Image (cartoon, coloured by chain):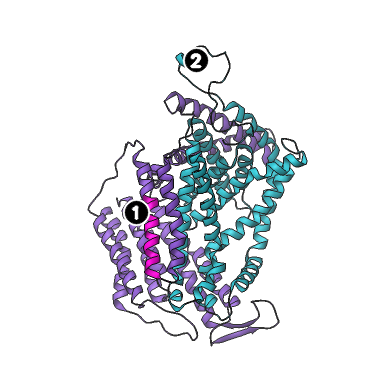
Chain colours: A purple, B cyan
């Protein structure tokens, strides 16, 4: 089992690799690695979810390409022209704009695919566990909601069956009322019972819990520093980034302190296995490598003004392969 | 008093920064053109803004949840969110036309009946839970949560015009909510486009073109919206109207009835000695204020 935090590190690395470059060769390698991870997870887990939605991604790339070609008329290789004075649409449709749009579509596809892999790999309880302790009411509400979703679905089916037996047929929106109202009332009754049960077990506070003023002030200060740093970064980049980091740290620290005040019991510890090390190493190599390459402007590529074959640095290609490590770990564990 | 001021400041700052984050594509081109160094960092902006919005959401959620830390609110929210998530699940299994989605009408109704904070939690957490259920976790989630939270948070704004027109707690208040739902049908789509627009259009050919300023960016967005989203969002707006029109009144009635039923309170027997029978000792802070909103 790959640990939840290892998956988060992998996702961060994948997003960094996808967003730092518009070079289609590197993007293709990244996308391929993500696809392999998805398929490895999907096949070994015997997931009931649908397989990789390839047709959706192809449509996404085509739409992005077509849209960019129609809306942007830069580039030297004219494919055809749209006559007239339609705002933004009329003008030359260029190969460069088409390819640039396709590249943007590829970036979006990669992001979708990375998140799909995460959704495929992590059970819902692991995702809930990621909710910070400071947000325990949110976590409890989320857990209750997730617990009640299957029950509510079952009840929806029961209500539908019962109404069908009475001759009810769905023809228009008005016909949803005999389905929705019983479901809704039953849900509220269940909420009442649950509230009584929770109160009987000691969760009876009726006073709004208010966070300490100091913590709120720290969060406010942190929030104020974020746009300040951002505006400052437009003139003095490093100083701006430092201020953003201070703001970020102020908010995170305040939330961490708020979380420490919340009693917490772990009923199920997630084991840390040796297979996590290559996943974390791979993620670190990809994120670090792309960050360094971006600072050296090695990753830069644009299709404008004339489409050219993108440069390919084998080292960047090799670094990108770090994204595929979860697939190896999953397959090794299976065998 | 101090806590109220701090809470107000948090609401004000997070909402302002949220609006700022959504609108950044409109003023970024001018800023980016101001120096060559800014052009180099232009591609980092979407991530910077996502971080800013995510942190705003966390701080706002922290502030709002502190008002909902009792068993009744937690249970009520949990079950209502489960019902709404099931509606989203059904929508995904049997997609409606265009942008039609059955989840917003319940967010509007709960926000209207129980107040802005409850509405915010209902909107934001519905999107979170349904993302878990349908596998829809992604970089768009903070944007969706924030916007859906705004829908619920702004729903109580309908009460003032309803009172002014003499519609409040009467049959006709649903018509006002229909107008509100229609407005959010378009606004939700227009706001949600903004997170992906800079990524799809591509910064290079948008920002580096000579003469692209605020007005031009706004014009481009208007054309983009009309071409890609207007028809889609029209179905969303019509869907909200239809659902509020057909289901709004009975659901609102049920919500108000349960608002009264949820005012029970358990207390140890020794504390009840000397209290007149049947009198609630300590009303829960939520759901029971005279204005019928979250306190």
Give me the chain letter of mark 2. B
Q: Which mark is residue B272?
A: 2
Where's residue A276, x and y in %? 26, 55
In the rendered view, does B205 fall on the left or right side of A126? right
Q: Is residue B23 above or below residue A150?
A: below
Where's residue B156, x and y in %? 64, 43
Q: Which residues are magenta?
A: A235-252
Give me the chain letter of mark 1. A
Q: Which residue is mark 1?
A: A44
Is residue A315 or residue A52 the one in the foreground?
A315
**A249 in the magenta segment:** yes
Q: Residues within 10 Å of mark 2 (few under 14, many from 20)?
A: some
Q: Residues within 10 Å of mark 1 (few under 14, many from 20)?
A: few
**Residue at the extreme left:** A274
Mark toward the viewer: 1 or 2: 2
To which quarter of the image does residue B166 belong? Answer: top right
Dot 1 and dot 2 within a common chain: no
Q: Which mark is residue B49?
A: none
Secondary structure, mark 1, is helix
How many numbered discs? 2
């Amino acid at each position: 089992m790959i640990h939840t935090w290892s998956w988060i590190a992998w996702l961060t690395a994948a997003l960094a690799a996808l967003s730092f470059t518009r070079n289609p060769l590197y993007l293709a390698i990244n996308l391929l690695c993500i696809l392999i991870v998805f398929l490895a997870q999907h096949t070994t887990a015997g997931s009931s979810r649908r397989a990789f939605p390839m047709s959706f991604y192809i449509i996404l790339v085509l739409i992005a390409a077509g849209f960019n070609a129609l809306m942007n008329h830069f580039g030297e290789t004219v494919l055809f022209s749209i006559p007239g004075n339609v705002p933004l649409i009329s003008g030359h449709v260029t190969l460069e704009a088409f390819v640039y749009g396709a590249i943007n579509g590829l970036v979006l596809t990669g992001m979708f695919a990375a998140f799909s892999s995460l959704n495929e790999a992590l059970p819902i309880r692991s995702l809930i566990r990621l909710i910070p302790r400071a947000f325990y009411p949110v976590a409890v509400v989320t857990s209750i909601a997730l617990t009640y979703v299957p029950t509510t679905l079952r009840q929806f089916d029961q209500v539908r069956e019962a109404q069908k037996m009475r001759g009810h047929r769905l023809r228009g929106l008005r016909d949803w009322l005999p389905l929705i109202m019983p479901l809704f009332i039953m849900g509220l009754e269940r909420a009442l019972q649950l509230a009584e049960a929770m109160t009987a077990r000691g969760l009876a506070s009726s006073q709004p819990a208010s966070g300490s003023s100091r913590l709120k002030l720290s969060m406010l200060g942190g929030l104020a520093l974020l746009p300040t740093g951002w505006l400052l970064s437009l003139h003095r980049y490093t100083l701006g980034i430092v201020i953003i980091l201070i703001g970020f740290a102020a908010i995170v620290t305040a939330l961490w302190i708020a979380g420490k005040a919340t009693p917490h019991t772990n009923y199920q510890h997630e084991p840390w296995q040796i297979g996590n090390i290559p996943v974390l190493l791979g993620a670190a190599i990809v994120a670090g490598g792309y960050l360094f390459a971006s600072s050296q402007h090695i990753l830069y590529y644009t299709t404008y003004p004339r489409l050219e074959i993108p440069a390919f640095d084998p080292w960047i290609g090799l670094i990108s392969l770090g994204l595929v490590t979860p697939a190896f770990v999953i397959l090794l564990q299976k065998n | 008093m101090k806590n109220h001021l701090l809470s107000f400041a948090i609401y004000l700052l997070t909402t302002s920064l949220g609006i700022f984050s959504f609108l950044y594509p409109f003023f970024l081109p001018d800023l980016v053109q101001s120096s060559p160094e800014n052009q180099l960092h232009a591609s980092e902006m979407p991530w910077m803004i996502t971080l800013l919005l995510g942190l705003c959401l966390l701080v706002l959620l922290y502030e709002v949840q502190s008002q909902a830390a009792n068993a009744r609110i937690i249970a009520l929210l949990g079950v209502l969110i489960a019902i709404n998530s099931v509606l989203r699940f059904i929508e995904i299994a049997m997609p409606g036309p265009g942008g039609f989605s059955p989840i917003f009408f319940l967010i509007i109704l709960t926000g209207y009946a129980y107040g802005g904070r409850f509405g915010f939690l209902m909107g934001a957490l519905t999107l979170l839970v349904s993302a878990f259920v349908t596998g829809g976790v992604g970089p768009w989630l903070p944007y969706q949560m924030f916007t859906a939270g705004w829908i619920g948070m702004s729903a109580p704004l309908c009460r003032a015009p309803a009172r002014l027109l003499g519609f409040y707690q009467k049959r006709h208040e649903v018509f006002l909510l229909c107008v509100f739902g229609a407005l959010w049908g378009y606004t939700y789509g227009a706001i949600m486009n903004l997170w992906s627009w800079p990524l799809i259009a591509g910064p290079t050919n948008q920002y580096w073109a000579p003469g692209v300023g605020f007005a031009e960016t706004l014009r481009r967005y208007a054309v983009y919206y009309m071409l890609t989203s207007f028809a889609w969002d029209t179905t969303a707006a019509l869907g909200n109207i239809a659902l509020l029109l057909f289901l709004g009144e009975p659901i609102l009635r049920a919500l108000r009835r349960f608002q009264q039923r949820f005012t029970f309170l358990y207390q140890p027997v020794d504390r009840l000695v000397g209290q007149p029978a049947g009198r609630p000792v300590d009303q829960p802070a939520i759901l029971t204020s005279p204005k019928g909103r979250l306190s």
